[in-house]
Image: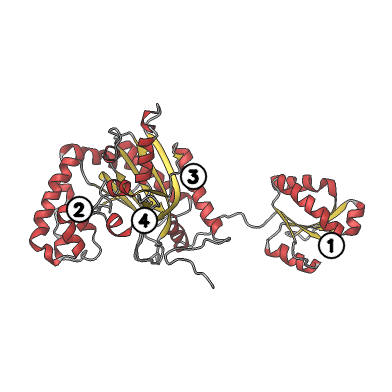
Amino acid sequence: MSFNIPRGTQDILPGESERWQYVEQIARDTCAAFQYKEIRTPIFEHTELFARGVGESTDIVQKEMYTFEDKKGRSITLRPEGTASTVRSYVENKLFAQPAQPTKLYYIGPMFRYERPQTGRYRQFYQFGIEAIGSKDPAIDAEVISLAMSVYEKAGLSNLKLVINSLGDKESRADYREALVKHFEPRIDEFCHDCQTRLHQNPLRILDCKKDRDHELMATAPSIQDYLNDESRTYFEKVKQYLTDIGVEYVVDPNLVRGLDYYNHTAFEIMSNAEGFGAITTLAGGGRYDGLVEGIGGPESPGIGFAMSIERFLSAIDAEGIDLPLQDGIDLYIAALGDDAKDYAVSLLNRLRKEGISSEMDYTGKKLKGQFKAADRLKAKFIAVLGEDELAQHIVNVKDTTTGEQIEVKLDELIQMMKAHKKA
């Protein structure tokens, strides 16, 4: 009996996993510079958390969640996104009581959504995201956006487009919702079933519909910009000012609404303009979610965050033809000849590795020629040949594969020689 990987998932194999580690390290290093600390939450949570936190009217909650009952009949869901879990932890662990505010957190890990798999989109996918909770200063909005742009730029991406919008405060959104209902209601029967359901649940989601995006009413729909009250308009102007001050270019798109119910005020997406990247250009998205913390039982704590797909991050790197500067090859390969030499090589290999020298030897009984081929495949910088004669003389012949130079080194000096070459 053979087994295949479940549809919508992927194996990330050696050779590819190093690329993942590289971009994840960029994200971690950037967060360290911006003073965001890592949080690790469970892969599954109580279903009600996502229903309340993400929003009952979202496609995620209605169609895409992996939900099951545990052995005691409790409804459990694999996390479809990271914000709700992070906010739940913020409330449960009383992070709002810590003296340093806002609370600045980041996460990296797998998320799960049951949707149609396609290029760059999986049912198990990986996200890097951040949350800044406890400040309603528009400067933190600019910081969050800047952090996201910095991660992409540090990886060498240049064909980027930042799109921003304001969804306004509670009052502005209420007026805008009413205007959208009036606009779409007379002809809502011409729209898909989802849009008909959204009309009174969350009419802003109609603007995000992929099926009806070419309907003529979409082009003539009211703009949120026309319904922002003075406070919301002032807030958005300040965000734009800060982005300009720190040199982050942006485009305002009044139709950008994002797909989750908890957003208000600032919303944004970062897209790739790279040729051949694909029809779905969004790399990351986020926004402000004032009210979410209170909605799941916490004190008033305004917040803002974003999430980016690691898969799409790597696809954008490929689309721009960027070669990541990955560590290539190992430091040393030990080619041992004879039983005694092999026994000594096992001990020597262990000592080399403990000193931080990446090294390898043969475990399959290859002849010397085969061991040299193995060293070549591993891109070893040096090859140490150890036979019975060398062992008796306490020496080893070391070849520099870059120059072809071969020298004789005392066995008890090999580790120091290799450490010196690593520092050079």
Q: Secondary structure at mark 4?
A: strand
Which mark is on residue 204? Answer: 2
Query: With 148 as the anchor, is 380 left or right in this view?
Result: right
Mark positioned earlier in the residue sequence (2 or 3): 3
Compute the Cα span from label 1 to label 3.
44 Å
Q: Is residue 246 visible?
A: no
Q: Sort mark 3 into few (<14), some (14-19) or many (20+) by Cα contacts within 10 Å.
A: many
Q: Which residue is mark 3?
A: 28
Mark positioned earlier in the residue sequence (4 or 2): 4
Q: Find the residue positioned furthest to the front.
A: 72
User: What colouring style does the render use?
Assistant: secondary structure
Mark positioned earlier in the residue sequence (1 or 2): 2
Q: Amino acid at mark 3?
A: Arg
* Location of residue 353 in the rendering, given as x and y in whole percent from the top left corner: 71, 48
Q: Which residue is mark 4?
A: 68
Which mark is on residue 337? Answer: 1
Q: Amino acid at mark 4?
A: Phe
